[in-house]
Amino acid sequence: MHTPYIDIHTHCRNEQHDVLSLQNCIVGKDYFPSAICSVGIHPWHIDIDFDKQYNALETYAARENVLAIGECGLDKLTKTKWEKQIKCFEQQIQLANIVDKPLILHCVRAYQETFQVLLQQKVAVPVIFHGFNKNIALAQSVLKQGYLISLGADMLKGAKNNLISDLPLEKIFLETDDKSISIVDIYTYFCAVRKISMDQLRNQLAQNFQNVFKYSYL
Ligand SMILES: [Zn+2]
């Protein structure tokens, strides 16, 4: 197989043969897929019966096609009670530590709180901040703590070119999330701004994927 394009976070099923995508499954909302996926409880979708939802997540988390826990995390703009969000996030960090799978994070206006909870819970697996669309200073502070960053369709608006130019290639991923866009377009845009070849980017992100997820697509 040719080095695939890697879409680290999507809510859609992959239909392109040269794309390897990590489909996201929200427990209690989405069907559990047979393809490789991340599985988690999103702060927007915490059930009233959280214990039951978490038990289901625990069961899924051990499955072989589950490569990561998430998206999960903290969101200051959602109506979900803060205490509930914290508890749900803490438990998912612990679960990720137990099953030894990376975490994919949703973080809205709660970076400092997220850093704090990760530290308190002694996160021991790779952490990826998905859909990152903040400034370079915040990106640096994410990287300084050893975490990774995934960039999405937001970059196509042109306001994130400094992130594209400055971020270390071995610390990033690309994603489509819930946008109806091809990951190839995101790769193409990234290469144009970063002034690197498509081959270089494809190889680097495939390498990152193997390093972080310990998954071989060969
Ligand atoms: Zn998402």
Image: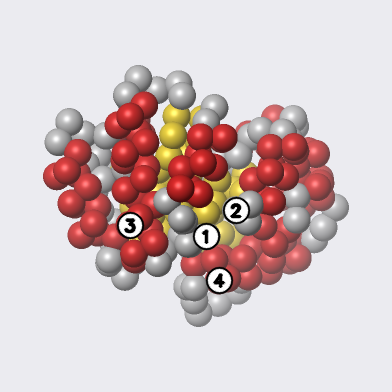
User: What's the CA distance linking mark 3 and mark 2?
Assistant: 18 Å
Residue corresponding to mark 2: 147
Query: Looking at numbered disc 2 in the image, what kind of residue is underneath it?
Result: Tyr
Tag 1's secondary structure? Answer: loop
Label of residue 139 in the image: none
Does the CB distance between marks 2 and 1 fall below 8 Å? yes
Query: Looking at numbered disc 4 in the image, what kind of residue is underneath it?
Result: Gln
Q: Earlier in the sequence, mark 2 or mark 4?
A: 2
Residue drawn at the location 67% of the way across and 57% of the way down: 171
Residue drawn at the location 63% of the way across and 34% of the way down: 133
Residue corresponding to mark 4: 210
Q: Earlier in the sequence, mark 4 or mark 1?
A: 1
Please determine whether, in this image, residue 47 is positioned above or below residue 204. Answer: above
User: What's the CA distance linking mark 4 and mark 1?
Assistant: 12 Å
Query: Looking at numbered disc 3 in the image, what kind of residue is underneath it?
Result: Leu
Side of 14 where 212 appears, left or right? right
User: What's the CA distance linking mark 2 and mark 4?
Assistant: 16 Å
Label of residue 95 in the image: 3
Query: Quadrant of residue 139 in the image?
Result: top right
Query: Looking at numbered disc 1 in the image, what kind of residue is underneath it?
Result: Pro
Residue corresponding to mark 1: 126
Q: Residues within 10 Å of mark 3 (few under 14, many from 20)?
A: many
Q: Earlier in the sequence, mark 4 or mark 3?
A: 3
Visible residue check, residue 172: no
Q: Residues within 10 Å of mark 4 (few under 14, many from 20)?
A: few
Furthest residue to the right? 195
